[in-house]
């Protein structure tokens, strides 16, 4: 029999028998946790897995099949006799050596004898004996065959142990096994079985606390498996690692110009800068300083990549060059795509790239909440961008060389920010420039990023390279821009064409208000506003039915008063017939794909008629055309191909209308459209499309329908204009030449003459 000994340290458990000073075994229960215990459990678990038995939860009681087999082989005879027990074990577990038979049978005999002394009858002893025999055969044969060896077998038990389990494990411990009991809920349940701790000892070391929530051997295995998978993703570790920003002085561009060899001396480190400069330090010198810096970098042999405004998305060809498989798990996908990263000239740089890739993807995995498809797309983006810029940044790379990636404008979305974080872990200096404090903000967030903020602002969209046309403002120029900011920002005063984007808000008015608002500039109308550099334009979109008091002369006169130089007048319906030839119809399917305008295709098409307009006006027109399609305002949109009619109609507008759009300033007087439909001819679908589009562009649009008939609303899905009923309906009217129309003055009464003369 082996004695239970006290350990001097947890490592005693892993000493071989002949290395133990007292040649004993250890039987401890662990009721508390700290980092040291956590590492011990991992190590002991592995020892028990390879050379012992692990029990997670109770040992199952022998079932009927187990008992039937035992009875068939051994019979049901029982004697509390050492010789009987030894002979039975020899037959039941024939692989045991003579030494093992003697120690195990002796230990069983001692245990059963103790139970008899405690008052157990023969039937109870027999049941215990058979349970021991079944458990030894089905659960512990691996242990019994190793008893007495120099490498002590291990038993690891997790949970609250039962009385019979404790008895058998004590038998095996006395026969030469080390045992560890993991008691997550504390020691109370165990002490009911062994009140004086005579069988096992409680581990008592400094710093023990409660086991972590949810801790178990299963979760430990899962974490170890995850760690193994993680190491598989990384592959062999690189010899080099980054030292980012730890060495810099925070001296703006000078940190980037600092020679690589003077940044640090540790041979296994590469020293890079990773910073963002928001605003400019001096409007007069900013562009020249940047220009001189990139010249110095290139002169010193540094490899420089400069990106302006945005990092172009991967092309279809770039994406297709990243082969992918079907993935079930993120780690599987990351490990597979990491194999797409190759740099044949230097295996250590390749390993740095792979480690950076895996690091970033593991960070992104926590953000995507199990969305494997989205995570895969991000991984493909990283590899596409790396392949695109690899040759420019790392051509024939050798330690300790450092490339330089300069991004003018800052990250616009999470994918760009992800790529910058990816690059920052490689031998590359990262410089992000956001000179315009009033422009779009850089969305990159990274605890390693060094932020430098300047108080002055400058509108710059391109980095000043030697191949670019340099434009540098004078002191007077920048002073004027500052004055513009003071005068035109939140002041109610607007410079000419200050804004390039606008949204139309249709006003609901009384009929009498049309004449009042008609000639008012937009900025003076109710509900006008500017938010985030977008103008909200209050516009009129109305239908006037009938003739007030039946007075035709007054009726035509009221319309004439609305005619301004910016007014487009239509007096005959339809303005555009559905049968009219339109060359744009044959191109509309090229211009619109899956409901989305193909802007690049449109602008590069030889049939495109608006290429001479200012860029912001072209974009404004295309924005409103897309809005008209998306809103399904026109009946038949995405039902019978009406969306293509919409595109063809708007791409073929009257040039006088187009010129009025071109000269439109979103804060001032807006262009107008008056449409008179005095007869019974129906307004065409094309007319409805044009008027709805012009309303979205910012025109005031008013229909005069003396007959009260249904007109433009026939082709609308919803009522989008206000209708004013002002008088009786009159039919078969001929529209006079309103631009030459003269309203006859009413005769002056004698009372007027007298009172006027007296004034």
Image (cartoon, rainbow, N blue to C red):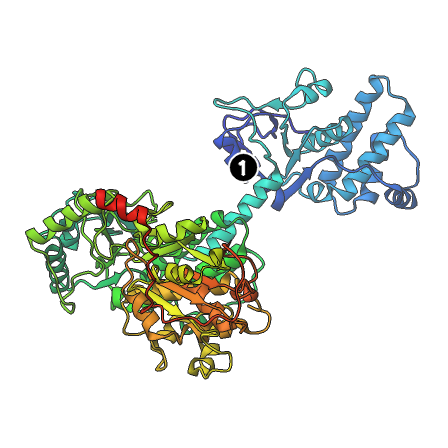
Residue 199 lies, with reference to residue 571, above or below; the image says above
How many circles with numbers are drawn on the protein? 1
Residue 200, image x and y in percent? 65, 24
**From the viewer's perspective, is 268 left or right of 146?**
left
**Location of residue 611 by image quarter:** bottom left
The answer to whether residue 346 is visible is no
**From the viewer's perspective, is 518 left or right of 7?**
left
> In front: 492, or 317?
492
Residue 121, image x and y in percent? 90, 22
**From the viewer's perspective, is 551 left or right of 452?**
right
The answer to whether residue 354 is visible is yes
Q: Quadrant of the N terminus?
A: top right
Residue 129 lies, with reference to residue 702, above or below; the image says above
Q: Quadrant of the C terminus?
A: top left
> In front: 484, or 474?
484
The residue tagged with tag 1: helix, strand or loop?
Answer: helix
Q: Residues within 10 Å of mark 1 (few under 14, many from 20)?
A: some
> In front: 240, or 430?
430
Q: Residue lying at the far left in this picture: please name it.
A: 475
Residue 215, image x and y in percent? 59, 34
Residue lying at 54% horizontally and 40% vertically, measured from the top left: 43
**Location of residue 168 by image quarter:** top right
Give the residue at mark 1: 14
Residue 443, image x and y in percent? 34, 49
């Amino acid at each position: 029999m082996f004695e239970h000994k006290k350990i001097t340290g947890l490592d005693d458990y892993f000493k071989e028998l002949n290395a133990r000073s007292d040649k004993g075994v250890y039987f401890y229960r662990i009721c508390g946790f700290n980092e040291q215990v956590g590492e011990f459990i991992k190590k002991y678990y592995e020892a028990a897995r390879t050379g012992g038995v692990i029990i997670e939860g109770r040992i199952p009681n022998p079932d009927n099949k187990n008992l039937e087999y035992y009875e068939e082989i051994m019979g049901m005879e029982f004697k509390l006799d050492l010789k009987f027990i030894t002979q039975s074990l020899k037959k039941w577990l024939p692989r045991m050596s003579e030494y093992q038979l003697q120690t195990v049978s002796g230990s069983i005999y001692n245990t059963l004898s103790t139970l008899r002394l405690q008052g157990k009858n023969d039937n109870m002893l027999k049941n215990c004996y058979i349970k021991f025999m079944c458990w030894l055969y089905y659960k512990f044969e691996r242990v019994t065959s190793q008893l007495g060896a120099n490498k002590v077998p291990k038993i690891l038990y997790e949970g609250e142990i039962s009385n019979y389990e404790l008895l058998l494990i004590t038998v095996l411990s006395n026969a030469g096994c080390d045992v560890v009991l993991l008691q997550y809920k504390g020691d109370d349940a165990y002490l009911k079985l062994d009140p004086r701790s005579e069988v096992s000892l409680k581990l008592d070391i400094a710093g023990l606390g409660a086991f972590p929530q949810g801790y178990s051997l299963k979760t430990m295995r899962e974490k170890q498996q995850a760690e193994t998978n993680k190491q598989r993703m990384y592959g062999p570790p690189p010899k080099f690692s980054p030292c980012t920003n730890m060495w810099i002085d925070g001296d703006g561009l000078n940190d980037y110009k600092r020679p690589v060899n003077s940044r640090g001396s540790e041979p296994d480190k590469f020293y890079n800068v990773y910073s963002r400069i928001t605003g400019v330090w001096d409007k007069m010198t900013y562009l020249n300083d940047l220009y001189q810096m990139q010249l110095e970098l290139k002169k010193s042999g540094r490899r420089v990549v400069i990106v302006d405004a945005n990092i172009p998305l991967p092309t279809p060809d770039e994406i297709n060059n990243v082969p992918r498989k079907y993935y079930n798990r993120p780690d599987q996908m990351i490990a597979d795509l990491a194999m797409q990263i190759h740099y044949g000239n230097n295996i250590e740089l390749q390993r740095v790239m792979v480690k950076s890739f895996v690091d970033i993807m593991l960070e992104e995995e926590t953000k995507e909440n199990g969305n494997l498809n989205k995570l895969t797309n991000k991984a493909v983006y990283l590899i596409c961008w790396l392949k695109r810029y690899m040759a420019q940044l790392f051509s024939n790379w050798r330690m300790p060389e450092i490339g330089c990636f300069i991004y003018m404008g800052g990250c616009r979305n999470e994918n760009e920010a992800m790529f910058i974080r990816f690059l920052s872990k490689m031998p590359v200096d990262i410089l992000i420039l956001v000179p315009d404090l009033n422009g779009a903000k850089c969305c990159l967030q990274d605890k390693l990023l060094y932020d430098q903020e300047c108080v002055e602002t400058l509108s710059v969209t391109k980095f000043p390279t030697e191949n670019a046309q340099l434009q540098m403002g004078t002191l007077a120029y920048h002073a004027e821009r500052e004055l513009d900011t003071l005068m035109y920002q939140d002041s109610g005063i607007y410079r000419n064409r200050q804004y390039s984007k606008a949204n139309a808000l249709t006003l609901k008015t009384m009929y009498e208000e049309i004449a009042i608002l008609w000639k008012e500039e937009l900025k003076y109308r109710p509900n006008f506003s500017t938010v985030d550099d977008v103008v909200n334009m209050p516009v009129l979109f109305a239908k006037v039915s009938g003739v007030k008091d039946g007075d035709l002369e007054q009726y035509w006169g009221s319309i004439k008063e609305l005619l301004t130089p910016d007014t487009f007048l239509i007096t005959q319906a339809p303005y555009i017939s559905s049968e009219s030839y339109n060359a744009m119809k044959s191109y509309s399917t090229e211009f619109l794909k899956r409901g989305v305008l193909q802007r690049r295709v449109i602008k590069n098409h030889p049939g495109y008629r608006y290429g001479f307009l200012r860029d912001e006006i072209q974009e404004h027109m295309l924005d409103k055309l897309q809005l008209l399609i998306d809103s399904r305002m026109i009946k038949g949109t995405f039902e019978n191909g009406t969306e293509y009619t919409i595109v063809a109609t708007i791409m073929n507008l009257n040039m006088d209308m187009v010129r009025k759009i071109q000269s439109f300033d979103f804060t001032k007087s807006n262009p107008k459209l008056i449409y008179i439909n005095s007869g019974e001819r129906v307004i065409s679908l094309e007319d409805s499309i044009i008027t709805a589009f012009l309303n979205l562009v910012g025109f005031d649009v008013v229909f005069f329908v003396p007959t009260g008939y249904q007109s433009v609303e026939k082709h609308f899905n919803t009522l989008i204009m206000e209708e004013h009923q002002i008088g009786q309906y009159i039919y078969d009217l001929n529209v006079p030449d309103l631009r030459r129309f003269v309203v006859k003055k009413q005769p002056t009464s004698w009372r007027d003459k007298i009172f006027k003369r007296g004034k």
